[in-house]
Image (cartoon, coloured by chain):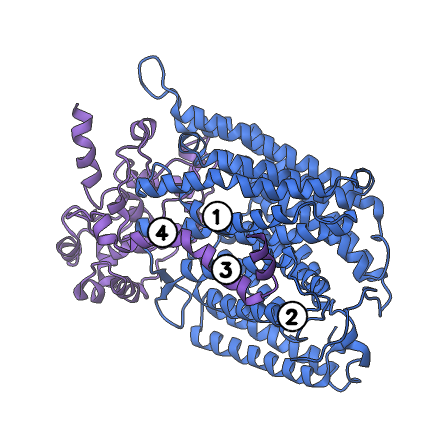
Chain colours: A purple, B blue
Amino acid sequence: MLKLHYNLEKVSLGMVAAIIVAALIGGAVEIAPLFTIDETVAIPDDLRPHTPLELAGREIYMREGCYACHSQMVRALADEIDRYGPYSLAGESAYDHPMLWGSKRTGPDLARLGDKYSDDWHVVHLADPRSVVPASIMPAYPWLTTSLDTENLSAQLATLARLGVPYSDEMIANAMRDALAQSRPDSDGAADVAARYGESVAIRAFDGNSSRLTEMDALVAYLQSLGTLTKAAHETLAPEATQ
Amino acid sequence: MIGSLSISERQTGLVLAIGLALFGLVMAAAAKQGPMAVHGAMALALGVALIFAIGGVFYDADAPAGRAGRYYDEPTRFGIVMALTWAAIGMGVGVWVAALLYWPEATPLWSWTSFGRLRPVHTTGVIFGFGGNALIATSFHVLQRTSRARLADAVSPWVVLIGFNLFCAWAVTGYLMGSTQSKEYAEAEWYADLWLVVIWVVYFAIYLRTLARRNEPHIYVANWYYLAFILVVAMLHIVNNLALPVSLAGAKSFTIWAGVQDAMVQWWYGHNAVAFLMTAGFLGMLYYFLPVRAGRPIWSYRLSIVSFWGITFFYLWVGSHHLHYTALPHWVQTLGMTFSVMLLVPSWASAGNAIATLNGAWHKVRDDATLRFMFVAAVFYGLSTFEGSFLAIRPVNSLSHYTDWTVGHVHSGTLGWLAMVSFGAIYTLVPQLSGREAMAWPRAVEWHFWLAVTGTLIYVVAMWNAGITQGLMWRTYDANGALAYSFLQSVAAMAPYYLLRTIGGALFLSGAILCALNTRATLRAAPADAAASDRPLQPVAAE
């Protein structure tokens, strides 16, 4: 063996080839099976993709680096289930490009945040966290009151559709309109949003003002959607909870 | 710097600079607005600056005749200056974000000074800016000395260094403007990622071409590690960053990976960026500069072989230990955990080999702060790889994951091991490049050493306490079977540790700034024609 290596280390391309082979094996064994994702991950029947407004909110969540302090992955541990809710299933993030599971909880997990607090609470909390949670160390985000840029939403939905997220042509074509309508429950388009994305979609003036579509609308819509895109996690845990 | 290029090399450089300026112009014009337009303008400005820099010396005398009989150290010098510049930026922002966790209001209410945008500036600044530049700079030095041959080309080292720094600048300014892929340690957007691939191919080519003209039959261990660093980082970077841009004229893209698949790819990348950028490359540094400074050969050749192939093979399996108890398939978690524990063997073989090399030179460790930096680095390498294997065990991870223990572990590796070995290498290299025996301020090296050690210890101990406290508070039940603490109580309990961490980080930062100033003074005090006094074995004509 030593003699073999003694000779190998005289050939630079031999070293290059050996390094590539040694390094490829581990990744190949662990990642390749996940390519058969359709077989290894059960995508829940009721899983819906994010609405355009929620997707725009997700962009803001990423832009502000929220994932650096908040996870979206409840582990299958008793205290986490008691604290946050049902543990996260692989299928729940099947349409997430990228996933936002996170790796650090400077703040609490957000996987089950949807419908936990009111829209008003979120709006006040994001603008000035310490006004509602005095001990909080979260930054304030006063600039979220700026108007939401919806220009690119159709192109974004189209890109995601090419990656396999089930956005129909109709959803892509109406992305801008749907984003606006989701924050205007009284508008004509509101019914279309519900028709396209399901009756469970929240259609409200998230920041309390339906006359203007802001980044706050988008972010709150996204936060309220967390954990509500499918009921699968609750149904999986339900039989165990009743035992 | 440019004066030592030959006339034809200056022509090549000028063409490349014009190309970069035009590329920047096209990028800015296509994007019209947003981060990509700003980045186009940055490339344009850099291209124009390079055109003027090269143009200014274009008609100067041709390169000195004896050039081929010398090592080419100008790129190394530039790389060290950039590494220390990024150290000041990256560590400075690190202390800033650490302070924000204690004084959350201590930042102006501007979007680009918000914690979430500054945090990737810290990570990219230190990992790629400081670490990457230090690795590239030292690799050029080590490659030439261990091959006893001059770099195969004079222009491409500059392409690598300038291009890499443009990538770093694009990345951090992008985060400030809110442009991010949100993949940890790979936040830069698609065009910056593609740019880095091009730079990396040039880097690999110059490395192999220089190895091809070596005057030593054997390739030295340090080069195995640098090669693994170049090759595997390329592989990880390409696979993790595969993305579909929304438009070729905009920064926004979506990664092709989704959900659990994305999580596995992300941590396969994330942990192996730790392995191959932040371990393999720095082991290359350690395997060269520690024996050189100690004046002792590496203790065991066999152990070097075992640990090199152990690290190259085992590391790629362990990324899944970041995803214990999550929705990742259980068998992948188990594999990750098993290999993480096995990884301790090659890791300790390396650390032990380094420490055993110091046998017979312990008096130098006592007297020479530079060598002491590298000794402490080897000790922290041993400690943090033990801690890493320990934290990867599933039940331990149930307590430590998501807490500040992970942050403490990372910093015991990055501050205690990577930064220390880099400082050791820099303090060895800078006097040599300046044609002198010692740094301009030898006592400042001693000060830096103690600032760095104290800072690291305060930081790491604070984060251990913080993490274990958090983990225990989250899982404690009271007598009635209810959770004993609210999440907010665990946040409040962190305050003293976050303050200590800020102090530890500030001590470490002040040491790094001292190093930067000392390096500046040493390089400035050097005569204009100062150069390393060692020579390649024999000038070899370009192949």
Q: Nearer the viewer, mark 3 or mark 1?
A: 3
Mark 4 vs mark 1, CA separation in Å: 13 Å
Please give the residue where the numbered disc 3 appears in the rendered image.
A18
Cβ–Cβ under 8 Å for marks 4 and 2: no
Q: Which mark is residue B210?
A: 2
Q: Is residue A44 left or right of residue A129?
A: left
Residue at the spot 29% in from the left edge and 65% down from the top edge: A159
Q: Is residue B320 left or right of residue B422?
A: left
Q: Disc 3 residue type? A: Ala
Please give the residue where the numbered disc 1 appears in the rendered image.
B315
Dot 4: chain letter: A
Q: Disc 2 residue type? A: Thr
Mark 1 vs mark 2, CA separation in Å: 28 Å
Do pointers 3 and 4 mark residues of a single chain?
A: yes
Q: Secondary structure at mark 3?
A: helix
Instruction: Answer above or below: position of B342 versus B50.
Output: above
Instruction: Answer above or below: position of B71 versus B311.
Output: below
Q: Disc 4 residue type? A: Val
**Mark 2 crowdedness (10 Å alpha carbons): few <14, some 14-19, many ≥20:** many
Instruction: Answer above or below: position of A153 versus B319.
Output: below
Q: Nearer the viewer, mark 3 or mark 2?
A: 3
**Mark 4 crowdedness (10 Å alpha carbons): few <14, some 14-19, many ≥20:** some
